Amino acid sequence: MVNKQAIDWAAQFHERALKATDERLQRFYQRGVVAADTPLAEVPLVALDFETTGLDPAHDEIISIGLVPFDWQRIRLSESRYWLLKPNRGLTETSVPFHGITHSQLDDAPDLMHILEAVLEAIAGKIVVVHYRNIEREFLHSAVKKRLGEGIRFPMIDTMALEAMLYRYGLLSLLKRLIGWRRESIRLGDSRQRYHLPHYGQHHALTDAIATAELLQAQIRHRYSATTPLSELWV
């Protein structure tokens, strides 16, 4: 469920800018954050997706990052970015079939440290949009903390959480469960189908970032509006 507890992100960014010891993090926080009352039509957005070696941010690692800037009407594909990253530990037999990334593809890939500045620059001053924030938020925080000794936090819009509000926590969902109906899937591909968005291959970080951007655009048009304040969606 979307956490509606009020977080003063502007104050947090100001405090973190003063406390951060790494210059890259200082610059990121100094760029500030979009005001909570900004209408969605005026919010600069960037969809972000990771592929990882597993699901535990304490032990597993990011091996690809895809991102694409957009707003509620337009996706700027020409400004999209995609990186492969070399993990400290090798890929597992179970993870390779899942994301399709092989050992040979990562042989010459850099460590996150070499592209961190570019990633932070790409998301600075924008609201990051993800599908299931526990992956992107926790993996990036953990990866940055391991390398810099300090983590990173910023607001996100989670398209999965927006779907969960209707299909996992809403009254209609409760009634369906009571009469034995199957729960609606809130996975990215299934969520897109409900808005009649096209099918894309999954588990490629850039493709999934684009798919997430399109999903949020559809969610805004069907369930929110251009004038909805950002605070209604971010966490």
Image: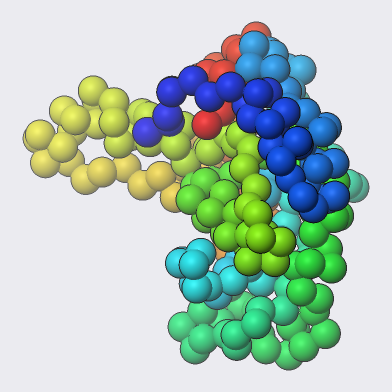
Q: Quadrant of residue 91?
A: bottom right
- Tell which residue pokes out farthest to the right in this image: 78
73 up-or-down from 59: above or below: above
* Residue 13 seen by the camera: yes
The residue at 63%/17% (across/down) is 36
Q: At 60% from the left edge and 36% from the top edge, which residue is drawn?
A: 156
Residue in the foreground of this view, choosing between 230 and 33 = 33
Give coordinates of residue 14: x percent, y percent. Answer: 72, 28
Q: Assign the N terminus to one quadrant of the image.
A: top left
Residue 68 is situated, as x and y percent measured from the top left of the image, at 77, 46
- The number of discs equals 0
Quadrant for residue 144, please give it.
Answer: bottom right
Please give left or right for residue 74 compared with residue 8 in the image.
right
Q: Could you say which is closer to the camera, residue 149 or residue 200?
A: 149
In percent of width and height, residue 48 lies at 67, 49
Image position, residue 197 (x, y; %): 59, 41
Residue drawn at point x = 49 percent, y = 20 percent: 6
Colour style of the rendered protein structure: rainbow
User: Which residue lies at the image location 64% right of the left edge and 11% below the top edge?
Assistant: 37
Residue 184 sits above or below residue 205 on the image? above
| Left or right for 234, reference 125 | left
